[in-house]
Image (cartoon, rainbow, N blue to C red):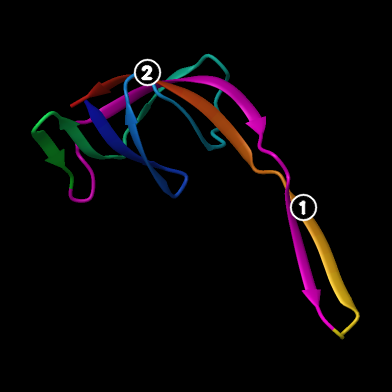
Amino acid sequence: MYAVIKTGGKQYRISKGDTIKIEKLEKEVGEIFDFTEVLLVANGSDIAIGAPRLENAKVKAEILTQGKAKKVNILKFKRRKHHMKRQGHRQKYTEVRIIEIEK
């Protein structure tokens, strides 16, 4: 059984027991919460697709950690113009474990 959920402007294909890193959620470590934006739920050949989302479907998840990803270095350079700009970014993330998919 698997599902497709939407969070943080991205879509994730998940199944029970999966651990994923998503954009930061303002919740505490150890807290159990529900994803309500479920776009698809599939159990073998039984597939339910929402338009745009399934109304009664929920995905229960537990927050494992809050953290920052590795640094991404950005370099903008224009040749022969004496211009170079360096910038860095560390995206905050929340690591969650999928507990249950409810249809």
Residue 13, how many percent across, how many down?
A: 33, 37
Q: Is the magenta stretch mostly helix, strand or loop?
A: strand
Does 70 sit above or below residue 44? below
Q: Tell me the quarter of the image containing the C terminus.
A: top left
Mark 2 or 1, nearer chain start: 2
The type of residue carrying mark 1 is Gly
Q: Residues within 10 Å of mark 1 (few under 14, many from 20)?
A: few
Q: Tell me the quarter of the image containing the N terminus.
A: top left
The residue singled out by tag 1 in the image is 88
Does 17 sit above or below residue 71? above
The residue closer to the viewer here, 81 or 90, is: 81
Residue at far top of view: 30
| Residue name at image x 59 percent, y 22 percent | 65
Does 102 sit above or below residue 85? above
The type of residue carrying mark 2 is Gly
The residue closer to the viewer here, 53 or 67, is: 67
The Cα atoms of the two marked residues, 2 and 1, are separated by: 33 Å
Answer with left or right where residue 14 lies relative to residue 46.
right
68 within the magenta span = yes
Residue at far bottom of view: 80
Residue 74, how many percent across, how many down?
A: 74, 59
77 within the magenta span = yes
Residue at far right of view: 82
The residue closer to the viewer here, 36 or 43, is: 43
The residue singled out by tag 2 in the image is 17
Contact flag, marks 2 and 1 (Cβ < 8 Å): no
Magenta part of the chain:
51-79
Residue 94, how many percent across, how many down?
A: 56, 30
SS type, badge 2: loop
Please identify the quarter of the rendering in which residue 68 is found.
top right
Residue 77, how many percent across, how many down?
A: 79, 73
